[in-house]
Structures are given as structure tokens and as C-alpha cells.
Image (cartoon, rainbow, N blue to C red):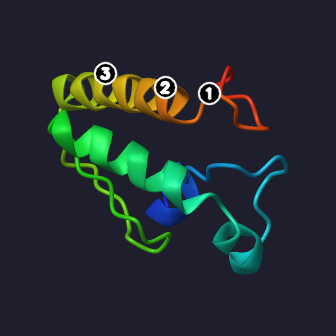
Amino acid sequence: MEGRSPSKNALCFGIYFGLKDAVQNYRHAARQNHAMLLTFIAGSIRRGVYFHVSAHHGYSAAHSEADLDRALEAIAGAIGDVRQAFPDSRYSLSDL
């Protein structure tokens, strides 16, 4: 990894609700289910984890392992909120 740009080594991901196929561009991402997204964001915030809604927000390496564990716990809870609010969604959240 020596000599490489950090951006080439970093993992970057996004969460897009209501889309069956992998997001390939901005137009596809913009078609996500915004009500599901807002339910997820609100659930995360209630659990003390902030998600920026912009796909171009950057990333941080300043979090401890405990911070990441807390974030994963909040994400799981927020996904539960989405499942409860959208039980008849045409796309399954079972893989999340």
C-alpha cells in the first residue's frame, strides 16, 4: 500500500433504498425511495449516529472500534425501523 493514494485504498459505500439493481450513476441513485431513506436517517439519529444524505460527503478514519460498533448497532436498529414502516416494500431488506 505504500505510495498509493488513500482514496484508492479506502472503502466507500452508500445506502440506497428501494432500488433493486446496484447504483451506477447519480440519476439512478436519485430514484431511491426517499421516505425509506428519511426513516433510516431518523432512526440512526435517534440512536446517536448521524448519516449525511449527500453521496459526496467524504469519509473519516478518526473513529475508534467502539464508535464503529455503536454505528453498526444504530444501523441495525434503523433498518428495523425501515422494515416496520415499509412492511410491503417490493424490495426485500432481508440482506441488510
Look at 70% across and 37% down and name the residue there.
89
Look at 77% across and 37% down and name the residue there.
91
Give the residue type at disc 1: Pro
Of tags 3 and 1, which is closer to the observer? 1
The secondary structure type at the circle numbered 2 is helix
Judge from the rendering whether residue 31 lies leftward or rightward of residue 20; answer left or right: left
The 10 Å Cα crowd at callout 1, few under 14, some 14 to 19, many 20 or more, is few
- The answer to whether one can see residue 77 in this image is yes
For the residues labelled 3 and 2, the Cα–Cα distance comes to: 17 Å
The secondary structure type at the circle numbered 3 is helix
Q: Position of residue 94 (x, y in %)?
A: 67, 20
For the residues labelled 3 and 1, the Cα–Cα distance comes to: 21 Å
Look at 35% across and 50% down and name the residue there.
41
The 10 Å Cα crowd at callout 2, few under 14, some 14 to 19, many 20 or more, is few
Of tags 3 and 2, which is closer to the observer? 2
Judge from the rendering whether residue 16 lies leftward or rightward of residue 68; answer left or right: right
Q: Which residue is mark 1?
A: 87
The secondary structure type at the circle numbered 1 is loop
Give the residue type at disc 3: Glu
Judge from the rendering whether residue 12 lies leftward or rightward of residue 71; answer left or right: right
Pointer 3 or 1: first along the chain: 3
Question: Which quadrant, please, contains the C terminus?
Answer: top right
Q: Position of residue 34 (x, y in %)?
A: 54, 61
Give the label on residue 84, or none.
Answer: 2
Q: Which residue is mark 3?
A: 73
* Res 88 → quadrant: top right
Give the label on residue 17, or none.
Answer: none
